[in-house]
Amino acid sequence: MTKKSFLIMIGSTLTLLCVVYFIFLPSQKEAPMDLKATQEQVAAQIESDNEYTEKTIEWATEQKENLDVGFIEPHTEKVNDVSPQRDVVNYFITGILKQDVELFMSTFQTETISSDLFKVEETDKQKVAQDIINRISKNNSIKGVNFKEKKGVFGGETNEVKLEFQYKDGKSSLVTLSLESIEEAHSDHAHDDILVITTSSWDIIKQIEKE
């Protein structure tokens, strides 16, 4: 093999390795969140869900003994088309910004948030949850949030996101959230993925306060 052929072979191999590296390298898609629009979208979705629930209860009441529970379908209409990862983050951020304890807690896996609330001796768990929100928001001083959705191989979805919290004091904190999928079954046997946060709220606070 001539020196020229050897160099060509090395060059081709390196080029191929670079192509493979960039194809398989997980990437992160970053976008600043419009906090006002996010809160409005979440509020609209909650209102839509509540209206559907009321209509379903009204319909079920009218059916009485003829009611077929298996016929009732969960509400699947979405006000905005976002990924499941962004959806749970939207609710999480809205819960923090609005100081809405119930909404905030609903974004976590039940076992996770329950364990978090009982890690302190305070018997009023509403106060515990409110304290968690205050520490994450640094007493409601969040002025911006960047959303970073981690992509897997070939740009596939992953159950991990990063949030960069920007505060009024000029400081910022990067937080990693792990998510878990729970399935919502429909009558046609299709499933929609709903994600919840599995990262402990106390771990979120540690990530913020170490900055």
Image: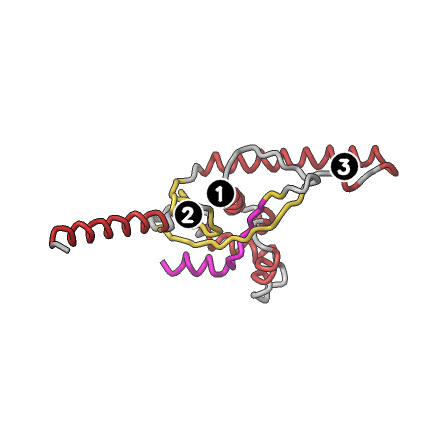
The magenta segment: 193-211
Q: Identify the mark nearer the N-term, 1 or 2.
A: 1
Circle 1 is placed at which residue position? 86
Residue 142 visible somewhere in the drawing: no
Residue 210 x, y percent position in the rendering: 38, 61
Q: Does the magenta stretch include residue 208?
A: yes
Q: Which residue is drawn at 38% across and 43% down?
A: 30
Say what secondary structure mark 3 lies in.
Answer: helix
In this rendering, would 20 be left or right of 175?
left
Depth check, mark 1 against mark 3: the one in front is 1
In this rendering, would 48 be left or right of 11?
right
Q: Which residue is drawn at 24% across and 48% down?
A: 15
Residue 37 x, y percent position in the rendering: 48, 34
Depth check, mark 1 against mark 2: the one in front is 2
| Vertical comparison of 114 with 153: above or below | below
Front residue (pair 125, 104): 104
Residue 29 visible somewhere in the drawing: yes
Q: Which amino acid does label 2 sit on?
A: Lys
Q: Which amino acid does label 1 sit on?
A: Arg
Residue 35 x, y percent position in the rendering: 45, 38
The dot on residue 57 is 3
Q: Does the magenta stretch include residue 174?
A: no
Circle 2 is placed at which residue position? 151
Q: Which amino acid does label 3 sit on?
A: Ile
Q: Which residue is drawn at 62% across and 48% down?
A: 183
